Image (spheres, rainbow, N blue to C red):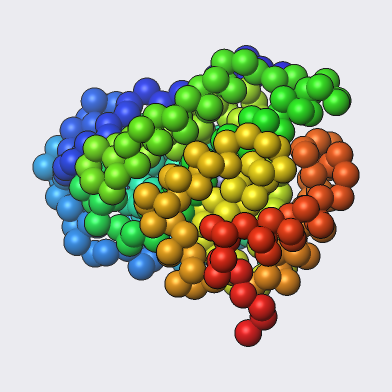
Amino acid sequence: MRNTSVIIPTLVRIKPGALDRLGVYCSRGQFKRVVLLFNKELDQTLIERVNKALGNEGIEILGHVPVVASSFEQAQEVFQTLPQATQAIIGIGGGKALDVAKYVAFLTRLPYIAVPTALSNDGFCSPQSSLDFKGKRRSFAAAMPYGVVVDTEVCLHAPRILWLAGIGDSVAKITSIYDWKLSFKINGTQVDDFAAILSDATVFQLMAKPDRDLEGIKLLAAALMLNGVAMEISGSSRPASGSEHLISHALDLINPKPRLHGLQVGVATYMISQIQGRGAERIAQLFDVTGFWDAIKADPFIKKDWISAFKTAPSIKTDFYTILSEKDHTEDLVRIMETDPRLKDVFIEAL
Ligand SMILES: [Zn+2]
């Protein structure tokens, strides 16, 4: 059912140097006292730039909170110790800090500003937080950001593998939209047409210029952000996540040290698109030009983990019909894995 109280970001800045204008953006939102949450390993110079940007506008930083893990426990601790006078929460860095920040924002009902420093998945602007709860990764309802501030220059200098992961998470919309429509046909799952079109469009926008330069980073940021908005509009993760995400979730459960979400999702998307009979060549070409395949081949996936994941993926989420629900596709996926020329050296036998 469509979310009747859709919240979309009020402030969106995607440009070089946006980080240094964070104080100006906070002032416009009338935020005078803020708390910063950042990844513990975040480059100190970025934090100094933020301190300066906020200081220049007379904005008081009530707390600097280094986020060690994206855990429910840490989010709860931050929530309990948050200074009373806090007017806004700012999350800076990769997934960890942003997941914790947006969950704390949800609990406190305070405005939240997301400042991703890399674009490895669509989590920086989505209504869900991915947190470890009692040792298991779970999705929690979270606040959509009041502001999204992406400094494209900063993201351009993030490791290349994170950019590739962002591309991988982005193409998943091709297969997830297919699964969503399939679920409608079989089970009557309501499809939100607007959210589906929005999500679908982002992939084509990205494919038009998949370059790792300021303009390409801007397109990727916009694509990932709009996927989050599509989830918020539809009140469901369907526009951004289908059977390809189930395989990635299954891998996370199998492997004690999961690989980057977007890399797993990207490869799973390519394989699922072949079963769905739609989009495989376009995805493959995007991966060719971006060097996605080469990056995976440099550190290949373990074949047996993926075969286990194909088997368990359909049961990961209840009441979530995808192409993997219609029949056991393990054999088809293994065949693709073993015979598709593009997947040569993407998988290796166990070490
Ligand atoms: Zn994803």
> Where is the N terminus found, in terms of image quarters?
top right
For the point 55% across and 70% down, the residue is 345
Work out whether residue 162 or residue 209 is closer to the camera in this orientation and state it: 209
Can the viewer see residue 283 in this picture?
yes
Q: Quadrant of residue 159?
A: bottom left
- Residue at 62 percent across and 75 percent down: it is 348
Q: Is residue 144 visible?
A: no
**Quadrant in the picture for the C terminus:** bottom right
Nearest to the observer: residue 300 or residue 114: 300
| Label total for image | 0
- Who is closer to the viewer here, 281 or 79? 281
Q: Pinpoint residue 154: horizontal percent, then vertical percent.
A: 24, 51
Image position of 166 (left or right of 334): left
In the foreground, 36 or 44: 44
Residue 200 position, x and y percent, is 53, 27
Q: Is residue 327 above or below residue 232?
A: below
Residue 55 on image: x %, y % = 15, 46
Residue, far left? 56
Q: Quadrant of residue 301?
A: bottom right
Question: Residue drawn at (74%, 60%), measured in percent from left and top?
Answer: 334
Judged left or right of residue 195, residue 53 is left
Looking at the picture, does residue 298 appear above or below residue 134?
below
Q: Specify whether 260 is left or right of 245.
A: left
User: Residue furthest toward the bottom?
Assistant: 351
Position of residue 176 relative to residue 264, above or below, is above
- The relative height of residue 138 versus residue 224 in the rendered view (above or below) is below
Q: Which corner quadrant of the image does residue 335 belong to?
A: bottom right
| Residue 230 locus on image (x, y percent) | 54, 26
Q: Which residue does the image show at 75% across and 64% down from the upper left?
A: 307
